Image (cartoon, rainbow, N blue to C red):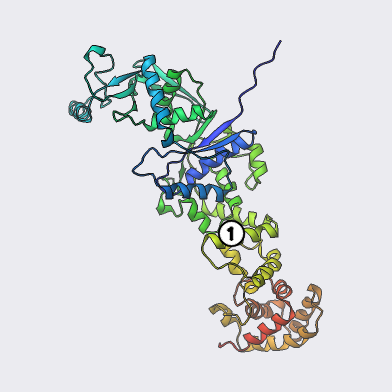
Amino acid sequence: MPGPAAAPPVVTRFAPSPTGYLHIGGARTALFNWLYARGRGGKFLLRIEDTDRERSTPEATAAILQGLRWLGLDWDGEAVSQFARKDRHAEVAHEMLARGAAYRCYATPAEIEAFREAARAEGRSTLFRSPWRDADPATWPEGPYAIRMKAPREGETLVEDAVQGMVRFRNDQLDDMICLRSDGTPTYMLAVVVDDHDMGVTHVIRGDDHLNNAARQQMVYDAMGWPVPVWAHIPLIHGPDGKKLSKRHGAVGLHEYAALGYPPAALRNYLCRLGWSHGDDEFFTDAQARDWFDLPQIGRAPARLDFKKLENLSGQHIAAMADAALLHEIEAFLAATAQPPLTDVQRDGLSRALPCLKDRAKTLPELLEKAYFALTQGPLEPDAKARAAVDVVSRGILDELTPPLRNARWSRDALESVLADVAASRGVGFGKIAPPLRAALSGRAVSPGVIDMMLVIGREETIARLSDARSWAG
């Protein structure tokens, strides 16, 4: 006997509206869809829902594509334009009409508004009930008409959701939604269903602000006899105060996070943890996320953005990154933020400095600030704290250090011995000679270890910087 039929391959999609920047919440939705598909050998599709012609812009579409590429989310095939499929949407609306699942509605906007005004005045529901739902075709007037879904009036519509569980909607609270406007243009509510069906989408993973839409969209599937996809409505992201995320909380656009210098891998890791968990795991790789991610582990409560956790994860990813990969990320960051590219000398210096820098920075700009000593050829321009660290006594220490450094073997052990000898000759601990030496080598009061810096910049540059620092005005 033949065994059970194999489940269809997983197909997910991300379907943003190109009316502005890619919101951090949208980026997380895209990530969840990408992880679910990629972890099961399925397809992740991209659809641009550009039916709102007044608000959709090519610039916003380009920004969305750029944001997804920066985040490292690849999609299968070409991005689909919803507007380009309007004829197919209209075709389905007329097919529902022919099946008796929809009807012609000749009600004008003025009539609908008058109905609602009267309902408000009388304290009734403003849910519009079209008089054309069961009208005799003999009464149909000439002229344009909208096509409305003939929604059930009694009982309940049940939406089985992989995140929210079984959700019930009273049918007397659902209207006969318009599928095709009187001007022949399809509505978003119809277009989404037709596109998802035609694209073979098996799992609709999206924000829970679309949960109410699912009840109405499910009626289209039923009317056409199409299989209903797995619904998975994920909670929205809130700010640290528990309120809906907005600009008052800080960065909300994906481009802002890129400009702040968070590596894409760190943001993927962090976004994955916003509302989803795998035990107590916080730091993980893309491969682990693809293996672990599943819908039942998504919580129902809104996730709260926590910049401290993001910075912590970002620092861990920077520290764990291979030097060559980190250098590539830094150069991409400089290009994306319109900063001058690294010269060959700077690239060489930074490459040598990365091992002593990468576990000290939480963002790429912070790493570049700490790398100032390796990116700049002397004389350095010290900051105020560094300048203050080189006082009269400190200049004497730098004078005393210079001769033995000229003759020392340039290795960690030998340099540590030189510094220890100078400290002992002055009867002080290493903590007394480190601050002026740190300031002279880096031009900053906070920097990597002095031995690390000396090994990176070499003997000649080290001695030149000690000499330069002795001339700083106190």
User: Is 387 or 108 nearer to us in this picture?
Assistant: 108
Residue at image x 54%, y 28%?
A: 200
Task: Give the secondary structure at mark 1.
Answer: helix
The reply, left or right, for residue 413 in relation to residue 223 is right
The x, y position of residue 332, in whole percent, is 58, 59
Which quadrant of the view contains residue 151?
top left
The x, y position of residue 105, in whole percent, is 27, 22
The reply, left or right, for residue 119 in relation to residue 300 is left
Q: Where, quadrant-wise, is the N terminus in this rendering?
A: top right
User: Is 201 or 397 nearer to us in this picture?
Assistant: 201
The x, y position of residue 4, in whole percent, is 66, 16
Residue 362 showing in the rendered view: no
432 is higher (above) or lower (below) than 296: below
The x, y position of residue 39, in whole percent, is 64, 36
417 is higher (above) or lower (below) than 257: below
Q: Amino acid at mark 1?
A: Ala
The reply, left or right, for residue 11 in relation to residue 21 is right
Residue position for label 1 = 332
